[in-house]
Amino acid sequence: METPAGRALEFRHLRYFLALADELHYGRAAQRLAISQPPLSVAIQQLEASVGARLFDRDSKGVALTPAGLAFRGRAQALLDQAEDACALAREVQAGEVGRLRLGFVGSTLFNGLAGWLQQFQAGRPKVEVVVVELNSQDQIDALLADELDLGLIHTDRLPPALACTPLYREPFLACLPAAHPLAAQARIPLAALSEQPFILFSRKGSPDYHARIVEICRQQGFVPRLQHEGRHWLSVVSLVAQGLGVSLVPAAFERSGIQGAVFRPLSDAVEPSTVFAAWRAGSDGVLREQLLAARQG
């Protein structure tokens, strides 16, 4: 740091000054600092020159702080304390012990252990703040690109080059039916049996890839779903089904959503499962992100 006198002031000067201010004896201060007395004397002279004021009186009776030295002492201690706090904070951030993680998630993760995962992650990190926000996959992609999220839990791996991802888990699709639907009495449902039913699907705008994937699953079974309604969130899709407005294919997690009026049945066909991916900005530093992902794998 620069002083008004235009000379560099080093933190070691402050440490030497405080040791001498405590001991008021060059020999004891030098011993406390584990240095010899001449370097201490030189450092104090350099400090006084940098500050532009005499900080100590020296005479045959010993060493005493001047009024300027007394005034300087408190500020010098505060500067060292702040420097140590800054160093400690930097170490904690690098170690992932403090900081802020902005996490986006799709609704299905709420019913696949998201809360327990976050509680486990934060249990040993009381200084880490995790901010969570529910967004569909496309909104999360946009937020990641705009540096508004650090990590997103999404339903697609078709991402812009600026983003990277890794699969978190897979789960089967289930047929979601109104409780009063005739097919609800069956233990397993062939997907083709839904070919003439009005479909409720996740919004094409909210997650184009996921929407297209479900349509393709139906096409593989010989039909194009008769789209009746779209929901921006999966819970909205399940709620519309529960109201009797149509049927849907949903990730198995929503069987645990507790929405009255909707029933869930496994499919008798082998279809590609639903996959949740963790996505982030490629090349970005992410100690907390990596620790959160490791906590789930553990």
Image (cartoon, rainbow, N blue to C red):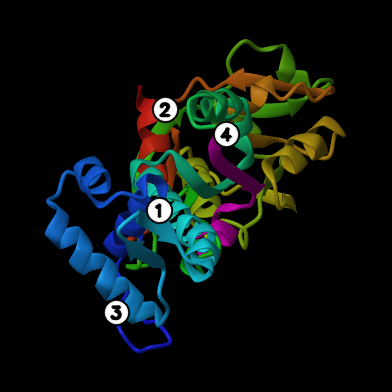
Image spot of residue 24 (x, y percent): 36, 50
CA–CA distance in space, label 1 to label 3? 21 Å
Which badge, 2 or 4, is on the more N-terminal residue?
A: 4
- Identify residue for label 2: 296
Question: Please, what secondary structure does the residue beneath circle 3 have?
Answer: loop
> Is 262 displayed left or right of 112 in the figure?
right
Mark 1 or mark 3, which is nearer to you? 1
Callout 1 environment at 10 Å: few (<14), some (14 to 19), or many (20+)? many
As measured in the structure, the alpha-carbon distance from the residue carrying label 2 to the one carrying label 4 is 12 Å
* Distance (Cα) linking label 4 and label 1: 60 Å
Gap between marks 3 and 4, in whole Å? 55 Å
Residue under label 1, please give it: 21
Chain-order first, disc 4 or disc 1: 1
Instruction: Specify start and end residues of the magenta stretch as a single range.
Output: 127-142
- Which of pointers 1 and 2 indicates the residue nearer the eye? 1
Sequence-first disc among 2 and 3:
3
Question: Within the magenta stretch, is there residue 132?
Answer: yes
Q: Earlier in the sequence, mark 1 or mark 2?
A: 1
Relative vertical location of residue 174 with respect to residue 162 in this rendering, above or below: above
Q: Which of 17/64 is in front?
A: 64
Measure the C-alpha gap from mark 1 to mark 2. 53 Å
**Mark 4 sits on what residue?**
109
Q: Residue 239, how many percent across, how many down?
A: 80, 36
Residue name at image x 25 percent, y 52 percent: 26
